[in-house]
Amino acid sequence: MTNSRKTGLAFAAVGVLLLIIGFMQSWNVALGIFNLCLISAVMALGVNMQWGYAGLLNVGVMGFAALGGMSAVLVSQAPIAEAWNASWSRLFISAICFAATIAASIVCYRKLAPGRNRNLALTLVIVAGLFVTRQFLDPAISSIESIEPAKTGFLGGLGAPIIFSWLIGGFVAAGIAWCIGKVALGLRADYLAIATLGISEIIIAVLKNEDWLTRGVKNVTGLSRPVPYEIDLQTSPWFIDIMTWWHGGALEALDSAARQQALKQFVIDGSSIFVKLCYSGLFAGVLIIVLLLSVRALNSPWGRMMRAIRDNEIAAGAMGKDVTRRHLEIFVIGSAVIGIAGAMLTTLDGQFTPTSYQPLRFTFLIWVMVIVGGSGNNMGSVLGGFLIWLVWIEAEPVGVWLMEAGTGWLDEGNALRLHLIENAQHMRLFFMGLVLLLVLRFSPGGILPEVVPRQKSSD
Amino acid sequence: MEAVTDFINALVLLLNFIVVPGLSYGSQLALGALGITLVFGILRFANFAHGDTMAFGTMITILVTWWLQSKGVSLGPLPTALLALPAGILLTVLLLVITDRSVYRYYRHHKAVPVTFMIASMGVMFMTNGIVRFVIGPNDQRFLDGERFIVRARDFKETTGLAEGLSIKVSQGLTIVIAILLVAALFWFLQKTRTGKAMRAYSDNEDLALLSGVDPDKVVLVTWIITAILATIAGTLYGLDKSFKPFTYLQLLLPMFAAAIVGGIGNPIGAIVGGYVIAFSEVMVTYAYKKVFIYLLPQSLEPEGLLQLLSTDYKFAVSFVILVLVLLVRPTGIFRGKVL
């Protein structure tokens, strides 16, 4: 009972913080933060599945989030017919070559006895296969990239509504996670961490450089939206009616000229809030679905098995559980959830910029959320996502404000003062680290520790 | 005769674009990887904060360098940063000892699992990163002064009469010399001194070492001091060679980990070899060999493309492909790791 009260209290505190931001700064800012809180919570849930349920240390969160973002581009952008026409035959052949290479290397791996010969044969097959593939792929890529490079220069996407990309992003991330998991999951915890960190960097490097796929560092902007545009809302009568009704009291008091002016401002502000609310609804829907499923999963026999494997792999193995397969399973599922969150994030941004993926923001910050919120506890991760994102965003204005207040005794143009105020924003990194260390030291279970739904043994 | 000149030209090209940059970058990586491997061998965790420790040490060195420059102090042809290094090392030692006392010691005494140490090191990474960005800002800083080149490309061409030039920067020469001296000193310390032997014993078998009267606190303290020295020097050399930017140092963490693991984590020789393996494969895989083959092959066989295996943007990917391969084929690394 105390536990659910604690959960309620913690979420109420976050709600109050958001309300304070709403009143002090603006509702637009508060809603913007709230939307990202929702996305962060989904991402943290994904990491929590891997770390909290199964004890897998995935430090490649950034890579899976970026894969989700890529799916948003590939699903929503209109296909570029010219590029396809110019390259489809070569692309097709290179895809076949690539598949053949993979198949041949699998055959090599299965049929040959382990040893130097096998390694040599494998290397040969892969190098030769990639060489042949590139013979077809390179001209295809250059023909794609040469078509209006300033505007498109890539293959485009499916031209489907962007909201499907959330699902597809999950599948893409899951697929890649399966490949990575097959290779890396046998490793010890710290090696797995380093390997996933590296793999996420590789994913980002590919997204930055393969212009034919995602336009690389030229970015894709102006993605379509699952919600109405502000500009359309501002001209649609029903929305203006709603705004008139909503602000009825305030408008009554004005004369007609001022009323027109005020109404216009209300409609402009209202449209942007309305759009954010639509996003909030969609994201909250996804969060609730993922959360419900994870709560069910964690409390099911499957969840118990996962925790058993996490707590003692050898014992669980002795009980007949297939540890490797279960690890792969949870790694894929968790990565899929991260991919979904990544696609939602790109949808919200309306653009895909590979250079914006940085490990501190996309990997380590999510980890702070999971650890601080409470690893192994789904509500904890959601709370961590909300709280840490709030702090992360608000640390900047608060830090600047503190520095201004703290250096008030110095001259206006004092070099030290200017430096402190200018760099105050970087203190949030310091603060995040401090929070992480404090929680890890004094409350290792996080704010909402894991709840094991059975009686504790007396050991 | 022409064939011989062509061959020498090709060699000079390779020397200029692969061997010299590979050696200096490899030395920087090796020094960084040594720090990671020492911490792993003694404290038994992968230290995610190492890149930022390097950034911190370099930052202090840069600040002191600027102060010295403003006082008009200089080392003539050598960079002033060398004079500032001791200050950088001293403060970095202080930083590492403070983090050990306030963060890691608690977990050590409670015999926490390595993963907990690793997550704690992520927290330390955040904090150090925050300090560095707060003090010096997130932008590029240059602090190289003195002579730029040991060998200039144009002078080399004039002296030898070759078509291709060879240039060696002071920072590159300095990196290689300092790395050799430092590694020699480290190995002398580990092999010959009492403390060094205690460290090796502790790394090999903690319980046995404790039974033999090795003082664990001293071993840990010395480890952090050595790590600070290595990290500050590696970071400063990298900063002199390229430029200093906090974000770059975070990214250096990846190739350094790769170097340590490829060589065999916990093994100092492995870290050095790993550093050069990673550096040379990064440089070699991303170099465009067209010109070399133009010199080597008869005119009729001249290559069409750039003959570049991968674009330069994939150099981080190279180190990780190697890392993953090593982990799969030989998880203990080239030199069976885990012991100092």
Image (cartoon, coloured by chain):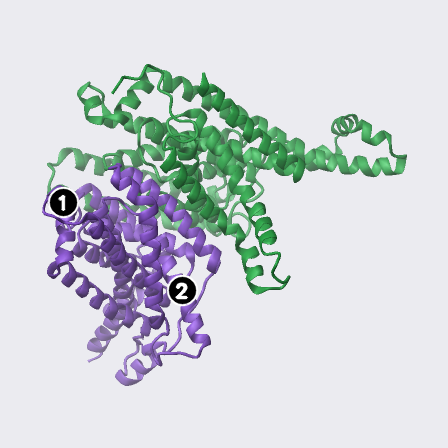
Chain colours: A green, B purple
- Quarter location, residue A298: top left
Residue under circle 2?
A: B243
How far is mark 1 from mark 2, CA to CA?
44 Å
Q: Can residue B105 be seen at all in this image of the molecule?
A: yes
Looking at the rendered structure, whether the residues under marks 1 and 2 are on a common chain is answered as: yes
- Of B308 and A8, nearer the camera is A8
Relative horizontal placement of residue A103, taking residue A89 as reference (left or right)? left
Say which amino acid is labelled 1: Leu
Which dot, 1 or 2, sits closer to the camera? 1
Do callouts 1 and 2 mark residues in contact (Cβ within 8 Å)? Answer: no
Say which amino acid is labelled 2: Ser
| Residue drawn 34% across the image and 42% down it | B120
Please determine whether, in this image, residue A206 is positioned above or below residue A415: above
| Residue drawn 16% across the image and 50% down it | B334
Secondary structure category for the residue under label 2: loop
Secondary structure category for the residue under label 1: helix
Residue under circle 1?
A: B210
- Quarter location, residue A213: top left
- Of B232 and B260, nearer the camera is B232
| Residue drawn 61% across the image and 36% down it | A30
Residue B69 image label: none
Q: Position of residue A172 (x, y in %)?
A: 40, 33
Q: Can residue A351 be seen at all in this image of the molecule?
A: no
